[in-house]
Image (cartoon, rainbow, N blue to C red):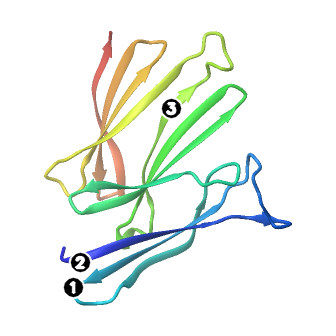
Amino acid sequence: NGSDNAVVIFTTHKYENGEKESCHACAPTIGIATFERSVNTSWELKQFQKTLMVCGAYGERDKLFLIRVGKDIYSLSISSEFGNQGIFQSYVTYYSLQEDDKFKNIFSYQTYSTNEGASENGYSSTTSIRFLQTQEMYYTIELVTKWSNKKQINKLLYNYSFNTGKYEFTRKVQDNVK
């Protein structure tokens, strides 16, 4: 669009007696700012949120990525993990970087789950997420989920809805038993 854009992520840790907190439930606060610079101009602050969320564990933040979700549209992706007593889960959440959206959650999904550490007849599921390029402003999300105990693959599609401002389930493409 003829301009440069930048995203700055702030991570604020809690300290006690000069030591960074690192307990299981200790997570830093994440803040975010976006900037834009048009040709031959200085950087302009477009959005700022001092406290977007608290995320992470053991004093460290979750994994953050910038993901292209449309032709010229990016989102902040946050991947988080949680485990307790033999049950483990991973999630990914995408936050809009569009100026009018104020960093809102546009899509969230569980990408991994297992209870195999807690049950003899346990299971695990893994979901991969892919953005399929389309002619639409926002790309289509394809989810492919595999289960360890079912020998089955599910493929789901999600499209962006301008009515709700987030991705919504569109259709199930396949449910194959191998």
Q: Is 93 positioned to the left or the right of 153 in the image?
A: right
Identify the image quadrant of the N terminus.
bottom left
Q: Quadrant of residue 118?
A: top right
Closer mark to the observer between disc 3 and disc 1 = 1
Q: Which residue is mark 2?
A: 3
Residue 64 shows which numbered tag? none
Q: Which residue is mark 3?
A: 112
Q: Is 120 positioned to the left or the right of 125 in the image?
A: right
Q: Amino acid at mark 3?
A: Tyr
Q: Which residue is mark 1?
A: 39
Q: Position of residue 84 (x, y in %)?
A: 70, 33
Mark 1–mark 2 distance (CA, rounded to whole Å): 6 Å
Vertical order, 101 against 145 (above or below) = below
Identify the image quadrant of the C terminus.
top left
Q: Judge the density around disc 1: few (<14), some (14-19), many (≥20) Cα neighbours within 10 Å.
A: few
Mark 3–mark 1 distance (CA, rounded to whole Å): 43 Å
SS of the residue at dot 1?
A: loop
Q: Position of residue 114 (x, y in %)?
A: 57, 25
Q: Earlier in the sequence, mark 3 or mark 2?
A: 2
Residue for point 35% across, 85% down: 43
Q: Position of residue 113 (x, y in %)?
A: 54, 29
Mark 3–mark 2 distance (CA, rounded to whole Å): 38 Å
